[in-house]
Image: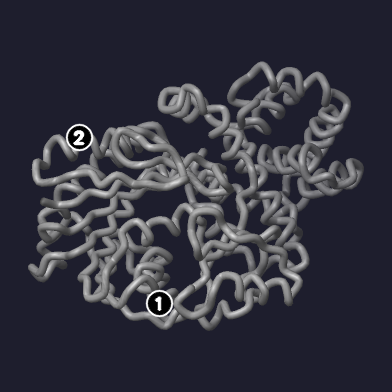
Amino acid sequence: MNSRLAAVHILQQVLQQGRNLPDAIASFSDRIDSSDQGWVQANCYGVIRFYPRLQFVAGQLLNRPLKKKDQDIELLVLSGLYQLMQMHNPDYAVVSETVNITKKLKKPWAKNLVNAVLRNYLRQTQELQQKIEKNDEARYAHPAWWLEKFRHGWPQKWQAIVEANNQNPPMTLRVNTAKIGRNEYLQQLAQQGIDAEPGQHSAAAVRLKKPQDVLNLPGFKQGLVSVQDEAAQLAALLLKPQPGNRVLDACAAPGGKTVHLLEQADISLLALDIAESRLDKIAQNLSRSQHQAELKQADVLEVESWWDGTAFDRILLDAPCSASGVIRRHPDIKLLRKPGDIAELVKVQQQMLQRLWPLLKSGGMLLYATCSVLPEENTLQLQHFLQQQKDAEQVPLDGQWGTAQVVGRQVLPGEDGMDGFFYALIQKH
């Protein structure tokens, strides 16, 4: 399939069907030539990442909005604009090849429209850039409600957050230090010509200078290394499971934190997830890393359906959240998440904390984690919990990462190259 046509169809799946971008791209992988797959991914991620800006520019150049049934033409225009603005392809080639896709979409009437929009962009680039700077949604490439959330939660840092959200994230690895030292693994990468540097806050973290196919990484198949952002690596380090501990990983998929916990100590671990397909991903990660855990498909809130009555020494609650801290990695979150979702997520988080707390032994620890930067999901959520649970006490999290909050610590997107994450450690009296 033509790469530009594939990009339009992938974008349609995301914006019309609400499918996440990686899955939409994967569904076309067998129809796109391997030499074109990198281009398709770059174009699709770019269009989604800068969608509000591209839409604004298109709106300035179109005489009138396109009809809903012609969203494919709108997405073709946005794809072409992104190529001209960010991908540094030759202008004449972008215009010509984008216009040609109107035939493949069986809408030859749109040929002149697409041609005019792209050529007018090239003529008006400077003027359009000035207009972009005066419109916050276009300038920051975020829907207005997201900008308001970030402004409210982080009045001094919201601009840094949205700018970090628009960057390409680094590829970070977690070395299985039970099998190989980080320095030794860095040497193996260097021998294969892969540039990398150690992380700053996890002794197992390695950050690649350029993303790589995981199959090119030495020892990946043997479980020597996994792909995991450095902020996510902090979870197992903060929970500090001890040998013999009974541990619950309450929302475990895709299993990166599950495996990391098992690498820390000889423990008995129960991993839950509500979706069978997501459990399969945990099983794959466990198999590759040569670790074992008990897996159960279950709704965390329905405790009676999965708990055997034996209390846990440690609980990791990596709670469902807005994912506002990982937008740079999953830009479709900007468009697929809706304003009303946040209150629902806060409610579910609160219920999970209440349902899991009785399952923790006296003296045990619960680590609450989200990949969110919104205070209502994080420090405000935990403040409320601590007010309700008189047998719960915050354990201060010391470290050089993130910023201490009233409860817990917050990493903002891009800080020390990390994703946005929140952690709070709570001990039971």
Q: Nearer the viewer, residue 336 or 314?
A: 314
Q: Nearer the viewer, mark 2 or mark 1?
A: 2
The answer to whether residue 235 is above or below residue 109 is below
Q: Residue at x 77, y 67 (%)?
A: 35
Q: Nearer the viewer, residue 39 or 115?
A: 39
Q: Residue at x 61, y 75 (%)?
A: 184
Q: Secondary structure at mark 2?
A: helix
Q: Earlier in the sequence, mark 2 or mark 1?
A: 1
The answer to whether residue 38 is above or below residue 355 is below
Number of marks in the image? 2
Real-space Cα separation, disc 2 to disc 1, in angstroms: 35 Å
Instruction: State which quarter of the image contains the N terminus.
Output: bottom right
Mark 2, Cα crowd under 10 Å, few <14 / some 14-19 / many 20+, is few
Looking at the image, residue 399 sits to the left or right of residue 247; the answer is right
Residue pointed to by mark 1: 286
Residue type at tag 1: Leu
Q: Residue at x 88, y 45 (%)?
A: 96
The answer to whether residue 11 is above or below residue 181 is above
Residue type at tag 2: His
Looking at the image, residue 240 sits to the left or right of residue 411; the answer is left
Place of residue 395 in the rendered image (x, y in percent of width and height, measured from the top left): 25, 47
Mark 1, Cα crowd under 10 Å, few <14 / some 14-19 / many 20+, is some
- What's the mark number on residue 384? 2
Looking at the image, residue 156 sits to the left or right of residue 33; the answer is left
